[in-house]
Image (cartoon, rainbow, N blue to C red):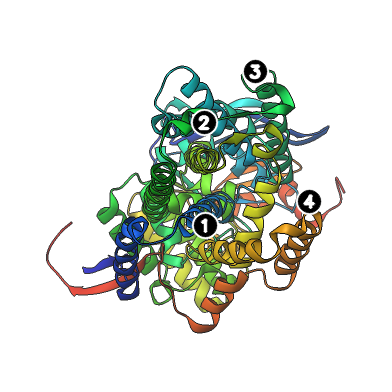
C-alpha cells in the first residue's frame, strides 16, 4: 500500500525485552523495531504478550531486562508520561476514558499535557482529534455516557491529541461493524500517509493488511515470525500457534 | 477549517461570583453591626467551610482520600505557637504557621503519595498521630496538658474577635478563589484525569506525582490555615484536640452530605454541619456517632450528596469547573 519503509535507525525499538510477572516469563528476549513512517501489525493468540510488549514500549511497565530506544534515545528508565510527551501514544485494549470528564475535556487534557500545547492551540488540537475520529457530536457529553464503540474512538482521539510520532493501537477494531471498520481503516491509513509511525495489535487480519507494511506474529512471549503479511500467515509455526498443537 | 471556542464561564457562574463578591463586602463590614456572638459563630463557620472545600479538593477532585488531614490542622497551630514564642506578632505567626505546614507537606507528600487508595488514607492518619506525639515532646506544649496562645490576650477582646474573624473570612475567600482557579486550570483537569484513571492519565503525558503534589500541598495549607484560625478563636492548644481525628470526620461528613466533586456541595455541607453542631453539639460521643451514621448513609444511598443530587435532577450548575466546546463558525484566523 505504500513505498517500503526507510532503513535508517528505527523510530521505536525494543531490544532483548524480558518481562516477568512474578515467576511467570511473559516476554522472552523480544526484539522489536519499527522504522519511521512504517506501519507494523502484531498478531498472535491470547496470552502471547502483545499487550505486555505495548506496556513496555509505552513505559507503563518497566521491563525486567532489555532496552527501549525512541529515535535513537534510550528511554528504558523513563515513565509513561515522559514517553508520551516525547511522542509515543497508545490506546488501551479495554478503553480507559476519564469518566468524570466530558469527551472534549478528555482530549483537551491530552493536547495540553501530551502535546504540550498552550490553551488555545490545545483546544484546536483536541477538537481536530474529535473531528477525525467522528466524536465531535459527543464533545460536551460526559465520557461515562459513551458506549463501547465510542469509548474506543475516544481512546484513539485522546492518543491523537497528544500529537504523537508513534501510535500504538491495541485492538482498536474489535467489535466494530464492517462499515465502522472501513472508516477506521481509512483513518489509520490517512494517519500513516500523514507520516505517523503505527504499530497495531489486531485480530482482524483483513483490516490489518490494508494498512500495514509488515506483520509480526507473537506466541508464548516471543516473536515467531515477521515479514510480508501473506508470508507470515503461511508460516508453519504461525499456523501451529493459532491452531494449537504445540504449547497448550 | 472550522474554529472552536472554549467556554469556561456560564451566565450562572458570573452571577454566582458577583453575588459572592457582594456577600463578601457585607461580611467584611459585618463586625460594625453584628454582635460578638454572631461574629464568633461565623468565624467557626468559615473554618468548617475551609476544611470541607480542602477535603473535597483532595478527595473529590484528585481522588486522594485522606483520614489524616488533622495532621496539618495541628501542625499549623503548633508552628504558629512556636513562631509567637520566637517573637513574631501573633496574627503574622498564624499565617506563617499555616505556610510552614504547607511547606512541611512537601516532604510528607514524597512518601505518602507513593501509596494508593486505602493505604494512603491510613498512612495519613498514622502521620497525623506521629506528628501529634512529636509535638507533645516539645516543652512549650507540655505534653497532654497543652498550652495557650497568651500573646493574643494583649489585644482588646473585641478587636481580637474581629481580627480573627477577618483572618478567617480573608483566608476562606482567598482559598475559595484559589481553589476555583486551580480546578479550572489544566492542573485541575489533570487532577481529575488522575482521579478517574491514574495509568491512563500518565499515558497522555500527565506527570501524576507532580500534579498530586500540587493538590496535596494546597490542601495541607488550607487545613493548616483552618487550624491556625481555630487556634486564634479557641486560644488553647491541646494536642489531642488539635490533632484529633474528629476534624477529618467533620470534613468527610460535610463533603459527603453536601456533594463530593461539586464545588458548591461542601459549602452547603458545612452550613448543614454548622447548624447540626449548634443543635446537637452538646451530646458528645453520641453526636459524633450520629454524624458517622449519617455520613455512611449518604455514601451508600445518596453518593452525590444533597447538592450533587439536586444538580443532577435540575441540571443547574452555579460554579462549574468544566469547559464546554462551542463552534465559532468559519474563520480564516489561525491561532
Which residue corresponds to mark 3? B138
**Circle 1 crowding by C-alpha within 10 Å: few under 14, some 14–19, many from 20:** few
Which residue corresponds to mark 2? B101
Name which of mark 1 and mark 2 comes first in the sequence.
1
- Quadrant containing the N terminus of chain A is bottom left
Helix, strand, or loop for circle 2?
Answer: helix
Determine the chain carrying the residue at label 4.
A
Q: Is residue A127 visible?
A: yes
Tell me whether marks 4 and 2 sit on the same chain.
Answer: no
Left or right of A246? Residue B33 is: left
In front: mark 3 or mark 4?
3
Residue A78 vertical position relative to residue B40 in the rendered view, above or below = above
Residue B318 vertical position relative to residue B292 in the rendered view, above or below = below
Percent coordinates x, y for residue A217 in the rendering: 65, 47
Quarter holding residue B11: bottom left
**Circle 2 crowding by C-alpha within 10 Å: few under 14, some 14–19, many from 20:** many
Which residue corresponds to mark 4? A240
Contact? badges 3 and 4 (CB < 8 Å): no
Percent coordinates x, y for residue A70 in the rendering: 45, 32
Helix, strand, or loop for circle 3?
Answer: loop
Percent coordinates x, y for residue B171 in the rendering: 41, 46
Instruction: Find the distance from the CA under tag 1 to the CA under tag 2.
Output: 25 Å
Front in this rendered view, residue B204 or B158: B158
Front in this rendered view, residue B187 or B252: B252
Which residue corresponds to mark 1? B41
Name which of mark 3 and mark 2 comes first in the sequence.
2
Quarter holding residue B20: bottom left
Amino acid at each position: 500500500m505504500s513505498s517500503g519503509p526507510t532503513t535508517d535507525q528505527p523510530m521505536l525499538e525494543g531490544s532483548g525485552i524480558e518481562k516477568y510477572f512474578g515467576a511467570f516469563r511473559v516476554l522472552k528476549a523480544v526484539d522489536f523495531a519499527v522504522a519511521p513512517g512504517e506501519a507494523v501489525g502484531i498478531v498472535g493468540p491470547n496470552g502471547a504478550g502483545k499487550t505486555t510488549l505495548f506496556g513496555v514500549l509505552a513505559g507503563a511497565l518497566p521491563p525486567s531486562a532489555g532496552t527501549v530506544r525512541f529515535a535513537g534515545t534510550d528511554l528504558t528508565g523513563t515513565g509513561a508520561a515522559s514517553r508520551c510527551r516525547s511522542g509515543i501514544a497508545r490506546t488501551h485494549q479495554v478503553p480507559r476514558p476519564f469518566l468524570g470528564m466530558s469527551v472534549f475535556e478528555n482530549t483537551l487534557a491530552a493536547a495540553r499535557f501530551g502535546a504540550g500545547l498552550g490553551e488555545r492551540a490545545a483546544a484546536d488540537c483536541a477538537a481536530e482529534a474529535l473531528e477525525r475520529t467522528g466524536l465531535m457530536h459527543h464533545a460536551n457529553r460526559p465520557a461515562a455516557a459513551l458506549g463501547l464503540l465510542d469509548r474506543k474512538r475516544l481512546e484513539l482521539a485522546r492518543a491523537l491529541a497528544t500529537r504523537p510520532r508513534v501510535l500504538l493501537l491495541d485492538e482498536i477494531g474489535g467489535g466494530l461493524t464492517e462499515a465502522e471498520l472501513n472508516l477506521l481503516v481509512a483513518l489509520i491509513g490517512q494517519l500513516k500517509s500523514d507520516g505517523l509511525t503505527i504499530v497495531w495489535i489486531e485480530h482482524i487480519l483483513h483490516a490489518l493488511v490494508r494498512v500495514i507494511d509488515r506483520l509480526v506474529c507473537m506466541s508464548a512471549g516471543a516473536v515467531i515470525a515477521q515479514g510480508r503479511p501473506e508470508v507470515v500467515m503461511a508460516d508453519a509455526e504461525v499456523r501451529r500457534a493459532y491452531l494449537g498443537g504445540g504449547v497448550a | 477549517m472550522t474554529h472552536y471556542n472554549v467556554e469556561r464561564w456560564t451566565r450562572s457562574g458570573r452571577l454566582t461570583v458577583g453575588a459572592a463578591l457582594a456577600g463578601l463586602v457585607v461580611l467584611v463590614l459585618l463586625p460594625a453591626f453584628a454582635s460578638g456572638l454572631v461574629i464568633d459563630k461565623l468565624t467557626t463557620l468559615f473554618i468548617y467551610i475551609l476544611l470541607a472545600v480542602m477535603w473535597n479538593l483532595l478527595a473529590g477532585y484528585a481522588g486522594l482520600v485522606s483520614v489524616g488531614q488533622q495532621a496539618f490542622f495541628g501542625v499549623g497551630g503548633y508552628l504558629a505557637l512556636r513562631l509567637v514564642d520566637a517573637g513574631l506578632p501573633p496574627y503574622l505567626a498564624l499565617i506563617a504557621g499555616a505556610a510552614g505546614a504547607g511547606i512541611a507537606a512537601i516532604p510528607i507528600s514524597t512518601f505518602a503519595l507513593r501509596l494508593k487508595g486505602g493505604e494512603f488514607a491510613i498512612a495519613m492518619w498514622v502521620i497525623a498521630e506521629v506528628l501529634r506525639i512529636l509535638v507533645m515532646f516539645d516543652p512549650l506544649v507540655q505534653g497532654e496538658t497543652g498550652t495557650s496562645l497568651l500573646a493574643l490576650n494583649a489585644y482588646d477582646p473585641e478587636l481580637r474577635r474581629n481580627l480573627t474573624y477577618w483572618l478567617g473570612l480573608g483566608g476562606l475567600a482567598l482559598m475559595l478563589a484559589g481553589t476555583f482557579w486551580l480546578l479550572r486550570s489544566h492542573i485541575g483537569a489533570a487532577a481529575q484525569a488522575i482521579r478517574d484513571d491514574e495509568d491512563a492519565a500518565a499515558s497522555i503525558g500527565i506527570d501524576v506525582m507532580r500534579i498530586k503534589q500540587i493538590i496535596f500541598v494546597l490542601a495541607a495549607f488550607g487545613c493548616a490555615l483552618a487550624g491556625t484560625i481555630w487556634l486564634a478563636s479557641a486560644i488553647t492548644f491541646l494536642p489531642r484536640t488539635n490533632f484529633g481525628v474528629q476534624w477529618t470526620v467533620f470534613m468527610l461528613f460535610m463533603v459527603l452530605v453536601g456533594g463530593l466533586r461539586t464545588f458548591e456541595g461542601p459549602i452547603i455541607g458545612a452550613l448543614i454541619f454548622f447548624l447540626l453542631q449548634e443543635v446537637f453539639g452538646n451530646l458528645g460521643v453520641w453526636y459524633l456517632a450520629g454524624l458517622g451514621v449519617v455520613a455512611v448513609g449518604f455514601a451508600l444511598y445518596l453518593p452525590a450528596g444533597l447538592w450533587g443530587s439536586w444538580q443532577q435532577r435540575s441540571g443547574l450548575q452555579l460554579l462549574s469547573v468544566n469547559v464546554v466546546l462551542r463552534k465559532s463558525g468559519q474563520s480564516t484566523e489561525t491561532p
